[in-house]
Amino acid sequence: MLIYYRFNNFCSFNCESEFSMSAPTGKVKKRFPDNYVETAEGFDLLKSAIIVGENAGGKSNFINSLKYLKSLFVTNSQVKSVRPYVNAASLNDEKNPVQKFEMCFKSDNGKAYVYHLHLNASGVVYEELQTLKKRNAAALSLFKAEKQRDGAWLVHVKEENGLSKRADKFLSEDSIGLLVSKFALLGDRDALAVVEWMTEKLYPESLTSDMNGDVIRQDADIRILEDEKYLEIFRMVDYSICGIELDKEKPYSKTMIIRKGENGNCFKRELQMDSTGVREFFAWAVHIFRVVYENKVVFADEMDRVLNPILSDRVIAFVNGAEHNGQFIFSTHNVLHLDLKTYMKEQIYFVTKNREQLTSEMYSLSDFPEVRYETTKIYEFYMKGILGGTAFE
């Protein structure tokens, strides 16, 4: 499960931004017993969160930063900052600005890891993997590689298992692939756990224009679409739906949706002929399945365009009410989500853009101590621009 994510100098973000899934300490947790998961290591982690903000404020850039970081683990290509993803202001201020990423998460092996990666246009300038035994405990470095001004690498590896010499060799040879990925190929268990989590657990997602054209994703989705538990989720969009006839060649267009009318008669309709909301939720329901039944960490961009307030409540109630170790985070324009009867303040994030500098900032509702749980109309504060994240700024 994700504990926190920090990043800097990515697209519209040019200062360190943090997104945390740690539940608050104190009595407030008793009001929301279903909203978090307790761990033996003391990390009480939230099951869901929302990101609210104006159009072009930076919500998609935040999720794209996660996509970009994950791609470095998936593609095994040259690792360096890509100019379109570097903040424009930093390009003007610095000759070769550095992008920074820091991911802290709890792996399936029971360990909590902190992974650091710093990049510039030349390649990796800093990479470190740490482990945390307990919440608030000091992090233990497993390996660290830092590029010096003269181009030489300063490398530290915790144990003498041959990785230190291999790290020197890897770093001197080329900039293809991450060091943690290379250690994973050598069988290092901690590196394997990190690579597996980044590639298999983290899902920063958005709908593509042609779902049927994504063959790799389609094959992975079919197994879920065939599961009876998937139908339970999909039916949230329309409870007259009683079944699907899956088309494995074109699941996101040719699949037949079966409904039962009040008279008990059934009728079928091709998914591509159904409403936009049904078509898009058909895809998003796959990711909700991944959260609840596969313990994935899903970031859903622009999901609010298919979630009306009633459907939103159903989805969040389903995610929070089930026992699992997944997490569901989605961006939204729906101010009705600003409800402290459903969410803790730590579950509500805002993204706002400075109109003069055109830079984005991310922060949590928990940063506003004056906002109390007894205040029931948080959305009014937001619409008036008091909380930021609106076009009024």
Image (spheres, rainbow, N blue to C red):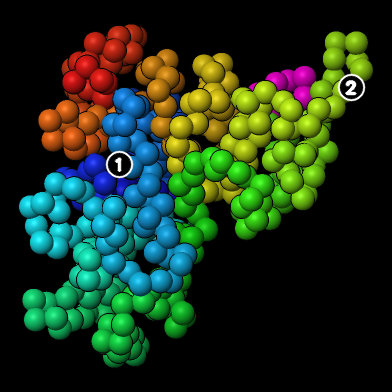
Nearer to us in this view, 90 or 192: 90
Res. 231 visible in picture: yes
Residue at 77% across / 24% down in the picture? 241
Tag 1 near tag 2, CB within 8 Å = no
Give neighbour class at mark 1: few <14, some 14-19, many 20+ (Cα, 10 Å): many
Question: Looking at the picture, does residue 174 appear above or below residue 73?
Answer: below
- Residue 289 lies within the magenta run: no
Find residue 354 and report its image quarter: top left
SS label for mark 1 = strand
Question: Looking at the picture, does residue 177 appear above or below residue 239?
Answer: below
Residue type indicated by callout 2:
Cys
Residue type indicated by callout 1:
Phe
Find residue 383 and report its image quarter: top left
Question: Looking at the picture, does residue 324 appear above or below residue 243?
Answer: below
Segment tinted magenta in the rendering: 235-241
Give neighbour class at mark 2: few <14, some 14-19, many 20+ (Cα, 10 Å): some
Residue corresponding to mark 1: 19
Residue 3 relative to residue 121: left or right: right
Alpha carbon distance from label 1 to label 2? 46 Å
SS label for mark 2 = strand
Question: Looking at the picture, does residue 156 appear above or below residue 315?
Answer: below
Earlier residue among tags 1 and 2: 1
Q: Quadrant of the C terminus?
A: top left
Where is residue 223? Give x, y as percent.
Answer: 72, 51
Residue at 33% across / 9% down in the picture? 377
Residue at 36% across / 77% down in the picture? 176
Where is residue 317? Give x, y as percent.
Answer: 55, 25
Where is residue 41? Give x, y as percent.
Answer: 37, 52
Where is residue 99? Give x, y as percent.
Answer: 22, 57
Residue corresponding to mark 2: 266
